[in-house]
Amino acid sequence: MFIDCARPRIIKSHHPSPQPYKKVVYLVRDGRDVAVSYYYHLKKYRLISNSIEFHDYLLKFINGTLDGYGPWGNHVQDWVNNDVGDFMIIRYEDLKEAPLPILKRVIEFCGLDVNEDNLVRAIAASDVKEMQAMEKAQQKDVEVLSNSDSSIPFVRKGVVGDWRDHFDEPMLALFLESFGATLSDQRYL
C-alpha cells in the first residue's frame, strides 16, 4: 500500500553512496573523531568484541571492513563529488560552534519556514547533557537501548578532537596516509 506523505520528505541516512535525492544536506565530521565515536557505538551494540583494542579496530575502520559503509574517506568523497542538484555540506565542528545560524541555513535550504524559537528549543533539546538524560530515562523502554551495553552511552561526549585521546603517533600516521587528502579537503588539516 502506498501512503502519500507530506512533502518535502526528510530522510536521514548513513548510506555509503549518493542516492537520487533532489536535495542533500551532508553532515561531515573529522574522520578521526568518527573512528572514535564508531568504536564505542559498535561496542555499545555488541557489534564488535568489548575486548578489542582501539588499534585493532582502527585497522578495520581504515580498511572499511567493519560494515557495509566502506572506508570513511571513500564515503565522504562519494557524497561530496556526487551529482545531486542541490547539495549542502555542513561540518559537525561548525555546527557545534554556531548551531543557530547553521541550522537556519539548513532549514532555508530545505525550503521550510524558519521559526527561530523552535530552532532555539531544538538546539537546547540536542544538548549532549539533555540527550544523555533522555537516553538514560528511556534505557529500559526503547528496545534497541535495552538490548545494548548500558555501560556505554549512545550519546557519549559529542566533543571535537576526542581522537587525540585515542590515537598514538603510528595510528595517526596511518590514518593520515589513508585519509589525509579527504581530511585536507574538508579543512581538518
Image (tube, rainbow, N blue to C red):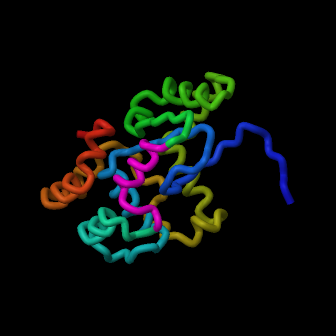
What's the residue at 19%, 59% (across, down)?
Answer: 174
User: Where residue 86 sits: x, y (%)?
Assistant: 56, 33
Seen as rendered, the residue at the extreme right is 1
In the displayed structure, would residue 183 be above or below residue 177?
A: above
Side of 142 relative to 79 (left or right): right
Seen as rendered, the residue at the extreme left is 169
Magenta stretch encompasses residue 73: yes
What's the residue at 45%, 36% (across, down)?
Answer: 90
Nearest the eye: 25 or 149: 25
Side of 98 relative to 136 (left or right): left
To which quarter of the image does residue 160 belong? top left
Task: Count numbered badges in the picture.
Answer: 0
What's the residue at 30%, 46% (across, down)?
Answer: 182
User: Where residue 82 sits: x, y (%)?
Assistant: 47, 44
Nearest the eye: 21 or 161: 21
Magenta stretch encompasses residue 72: yes
Q: Which residues are magenta?
A: 68-82
What's the residue at 21%, 52% (across, down)?
Answer: 176
Side of 55 relative to 105 (left or right): left
In the displayed structure, would residue 149 be above or below residue 119?
A: below
